[in-house]
Amino acid sequence: MSAFVQIKFAEAPAGSVEIATSWHFGSKERPEGVLTRDEYHESRKGAGEHTVQAIVAHGENIGATKWVCVSKGNNCPVHGTSTQYAGESPQAKAARLKREAEARLELKRRRAIFEAIREKARKGRSLDLTDYRLITSEFFARLHFDTSKQFVVLNGYVTPAMAKQRKVEPSGSDNGNDYTTYFQNLVAKADLKQLGAWLLELALIQHRDHAPYSYAGDKTMSDPLFETARRWRVDAKSVCPAAGNKSNPAQQRKTEKPATSKKGKRS
């Protein structure tokens, strides 16, 4: 096909150009001398002084003849301006290669440090207060926006709407940055006991309003909220009398049988 294009180009009038009808070359390098789709405007014969004949060298209809405007740096009264691609300068290429080399080195360095910390932690190094503060902050950062808002409100954050209702000063605005700043200030002053309590809250808060949903048919998933309540000997009936003995709503729904009418048919 390349030879066919070269034959067509040799037969074309002087001043003709080779063009690509596609916007990119995929995994291939840009063919030398071929204008990309953003370097010309489709035109018609005689439309202007910058209109020349072109042979399609890449993309659809390879070998076809077209008329295109290649105004380059000049303003074409018909098509406007089309910028001629000059390629990457040696200075720009050197700077790019330097940045890429630095990025590879930084990635290698960070991974090596991570593995060294991981090895020490697995050899029995006990976590200290700073470690627990880091873990707590990072767990909080992974919460969705609405969940992080719930969490900080449960821990004393006053939103603008709450402040207006209570006629007090808000802790901050309704945005994730303020929630994070507020909680980080709390974490910086917390002891191990408080951090441990927050870690448990962070693990359970997404189950505060929603039971786990199973995508595996009738298979019932364990509910971390009620499982933790049992382990901590929290009596659901005493904390919420209306709940009675429904210790696990998901299990309750599975075991309940449909009501039947007097004729024995299910209602």
Image: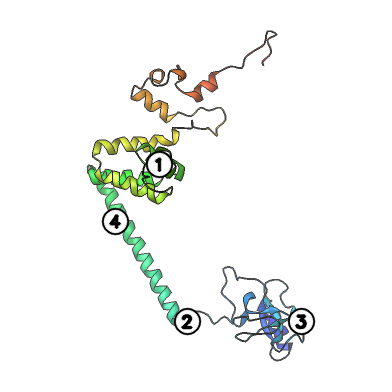
Q: Residue at x 45, y 82 (%)?
A: 90
Distance in Å between CA atoms under marks 2 and 4:
36 Å
* Disc 2 residue type (three-letter): Ser
Sequence-wise, which precedes: disc 3 or disc 4? Answer: 3
Residue of label 1: 163
Sequence-wise, which precedes: disc 2 or disc 4? Answer: 2
Distance in Å between CA atoms under marks 1 and 3:
68 Å
Identify the image quadrant of residue 77: bottom right
Residue of label 4: 113
* Disc 4 residue type (three-letter): Ile
Residue of label 3: 44
Residue 199 place in picture, x, y as percent: 33, 38
Sequence-wise, which precedes: disc 1 or disc 4? Answer: 4
Identify the element where label 3 is drawn: loop
Identify the element where label 2 is drawn: loop
* Disc 1 residue type (three-letter): Ala
Q: Residue at x 36, y 48 (%)?
A: 180
Taking the view exactly as shown, the residue that stands out farthest to the top is 262
